[in-house]
């Protein structure tokens, strides 16, 4: 499940890309698939880093890469273990809503980006996320600790205050919002509910098979109910 639209980034062969809060490595692996890119995934969760390593090793085995390289690192987004201006692009997908000191995290994203670098940040979209919080009082704790809900302009202002130039926005995963509302209705940790299991199988099928109808439906739903807000910036 890829949230960031790489076509909106000016990625060039040989770039070094950081995927901070990489989780199991979905964006790290996608970046590794680009021509001669060095893709670095960083996360605090050791279990997720192991999953990311397995995913990337599988990409190596299957030849699903662009001839570049990859690496993984344990990292705290508020104190990144990388030099200033180390990366040609920085991706931070579905992370900021978990971070109490989000301004410190934003400052680190900017610090490690080179001048001219793309910086892309995605968070849960305000109103689908608000419904989740309304339907299940324990949702924010069950969903790995969401500490806030961002409004689009609020997040844009915060990142521009760190010196970034705003390029534009998009929405992603319109088919996923109803899934999370359903989960909240039956209990956000109740993964065994028959309706949740059925919808999850549908989403996995959509991700793996990419049928034209559901891809079209997702694109049509994204402007109205896309689960994720994706913001695109450039470091001057």
Image (cartoon, grey):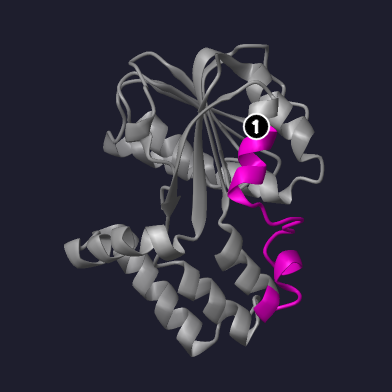
Nearest the viewer among 41 and 113 is: 113
Image-based side of 48 in relation to 171, left or right: right
Seen at 48% across and 74% down, the residue is: 179
User: Does residue 76 show up?
Assistant: no
- Against 81, is 226 above or below? below
Where in the figure is residue 30, as x and y percent of width and height? 38, 37
Where in the figure is residue 195, as x and y percent of width and height? 47, 86
User: Does residue 223 show up?
Assistant: yes
- Against 77, is 145 above or below? below
Seen at 64% across and 76% down, the residue is: 188
Residue on which disc 1 sits: 159
Quarter occupied by residue 87: top right
- Tell me which segment is drawn in magenta: 134-158
Seen at 39% across and 28% down, the residue is: 9
Nearest the viewer among 27 and 100 is: 100
Nearest the viewer among 16 and 136 is: 136
Element under disc 1: helix
Image-based side of 32 in relation to 159, left or right: left
Looking at the rendered image, the quarter that the C terminus falls into is top right
Seen at 68% across and 18% down, the residue is: 111
Residue 47 shown in magenta = no
- Against 150, is 198 above or below? below
Where in the figure is residue 206, as x and y percent of width and height? 30, 65
Crowding at dot 1, Cα within 10 Å, few <14 / some 14-19 / many 20+, comes out as many
Quarter occupied by residue 115: top right
Image-based side of 160 in relation to 55, left or right: right
- In the image as oriented, which residue stretches furthest toward the left? 212
């Amino acid at each position: 499940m890829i949230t960031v639209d790489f076509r909106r980034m000016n990625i060039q062969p040989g770039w070094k890309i950081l995927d901070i809060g990489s989780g199991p490595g979905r964006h790290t692996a996608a970046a590794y698939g680009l021509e001669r890119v060095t893709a670095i995934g960083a996360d605090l969760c050791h279990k997720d880093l192991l999953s990311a390593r397995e995913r990337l090793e599988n990409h190596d085995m299957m030849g699903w890469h662009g001839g570049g390289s990859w690496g993984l690192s344990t990292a705290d987004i508020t104190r990144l273990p990388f030099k200033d201006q180390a990366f040609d692009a920085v991706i931070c997908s579905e992370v900021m809503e978990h971070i109490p000191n989000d301004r410190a995290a934003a400052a680190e994203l900017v610090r490690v980006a080179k001048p001219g670098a793309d910086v892309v940040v995605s968070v849960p979209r305000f109103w689908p996320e608000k419904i989740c919080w309304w339907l299940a009082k324990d949702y924010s704790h069950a969903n790995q600790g969401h500490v806030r809900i961002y409004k689009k302009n609020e997040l844009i202002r915060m990142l521009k205050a760190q010196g970034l130039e705003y390029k534009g926005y998009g929405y992603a995963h319109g088919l996923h919002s109803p899934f999370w509302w359903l989960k909240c209705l039956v209990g956000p940790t109740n993964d065994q509910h028959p309706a949740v299991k059925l919808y999850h199988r549908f989403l996995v099928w959509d991700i793996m098979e990419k049928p034209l109808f559901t891809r079209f439906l997702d694109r049509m739903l994204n402007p109205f109910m896309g689960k994720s807000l994706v913001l695109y910036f450039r470091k001057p």
